[in-house]
Image (cartoon, rainbow, N blue to C red):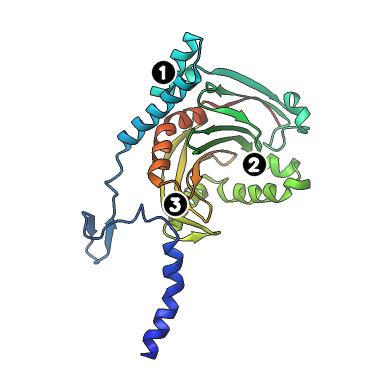
Amino acid sequence: MRKLLLLLFAITPLLHTSAQYSNYYNVDVNSYSKVDVDVNANVKVDKTITTIDYGALALANVEKQKNRIELLRINDEKEKRAMIAIANNPSLALDYGTTTEFRIPQDVKNSGVKNGYGWGYKSFLWGLRIPHKSLFIPVKSDKGGWKFENISDDGISTVVNIMGQINVENRFKKFKCENRRAINCQEKNELLKKIINSNDLKKFIKAQKENEGKIVDDIFYHKVSIGRANIQGADGYKVMSITEDDFEKAITQDFYFSDGTIVIQASSKVSADKEFSFEDIEGRNYYLTPIIEKMISSSWFAKLKL
């Protein structure tokens, strides 16, 4: 009896920890699973959630977006047609958007940027397509790049960060981490050291799968998936993490490319308060991912000076 009480005492914190998180991604063990067995008797179970109807979720987001447009009472018919087209197909936000180019550091000196060595260049030209304002608006970035935000009428936030490309060796030589951003800068340098080599990047990407089902830095990882992605025209990688903490639920997508000299990074995050269901967040992420990937692939660097 004493051993049983000790066992119950030991597992109670674990049960409490798991209970605070959504069970949306839990899989019924009696449901269909694909099982692979090899000759060494190792068993791999691929658990697939089949209850998520992504098509229905996307259509719900289309209708919400259209309803929002109707409530705005737009007089400009051309603008209204553009917004409805974008609501039906968010990828069109770039077609109805604008192209912009910034000279670094000339065009951003007012924000305190003295040179481009944060990206490993003395100066460069950074261009990309800005999506139509009905879907994303540019906001101030805290990660040294472009940041766009969309907040749905019901309060689901979508943020896209395009950090651009970094000549890693030159950044380490000529850029100093200082002032209030020193900690974030040092963390970024540590990450760059880990992924500058393309083989190390592959290992880093694969290692992210190990977070699945675990609590890391007070964040519970429901699911982690990895794959290929186009980032600034290069064949890179994407890590999608479905997470939850004490305050919010989120789906984060991190994009990476490395060729041994430069590293390119971007990310997106769809998040909402705890009272939202993961179905709501999944729907928003599925609806906006095509335009997010298009935005990330459309960025370019030119006129590079070391």
Q: Amino acid at mark 1?
A: Ala
Q: Quadrant of the N terminus?
A: bottom left
Mark 3 near mark 2, Cβ–Cβ under 8 Å?
A: no
What is the x, y in percent for residue 59?
A: 34, 30
What is the x, y in percent for residue 257?
A: 52, 39
Q: Earlier in the sequence, mark 3 or mark 2?
A: 2
> Is 5 on the left or on the right of 29, as rendered?
right
Query: In the figure, residue 121 lies in which quadrant?
Result: top right
At label 2, counting other C-alpha atoms closer than 10 Å, the crowd grade (few under 14, some 14-19, many 20 or more) is many
Above or below for 154 versus 184: above
Q: Residue at x 40, y 41 (%)?
A: 280
- Mark yes or no: residue 89 visible: no
> Is 49 on the left or on the right of 236, as rendered?
left
At label 1, counting other C-alpha atoms closer than 10 Å, the crowd grade (few under 14, some 14-19, many 20 or more) is some
Query: In the figure, residue 258 lies in which quadrant?
Result: top right
Q: Which residue is mark 2?
A: 168
Q: Earlier in the sequence, mark 1 or mark 2?
A: 1
Mark 1 near mark 3, Cβ–Cβ under 8 Å?
A: no
Q: Which residue is mark 1?
A: 85
At label 3, counting other C-alpha atoms closer than 10 Å, the crowd grade (few under 14, some 14-19, many 20 or more) is some
Q: Amino acid at mark 2?
A: Val
- Mark yes or no: residue 267 visible: yes
Q: Which mark is residue 206?
A: 3
Say which of marks 1 and 3 sits in front: 1
What is the x, y in percent for residue 230?
A: 46, 33
> Is 22 on the left or on the right of 176, as rendered?
left
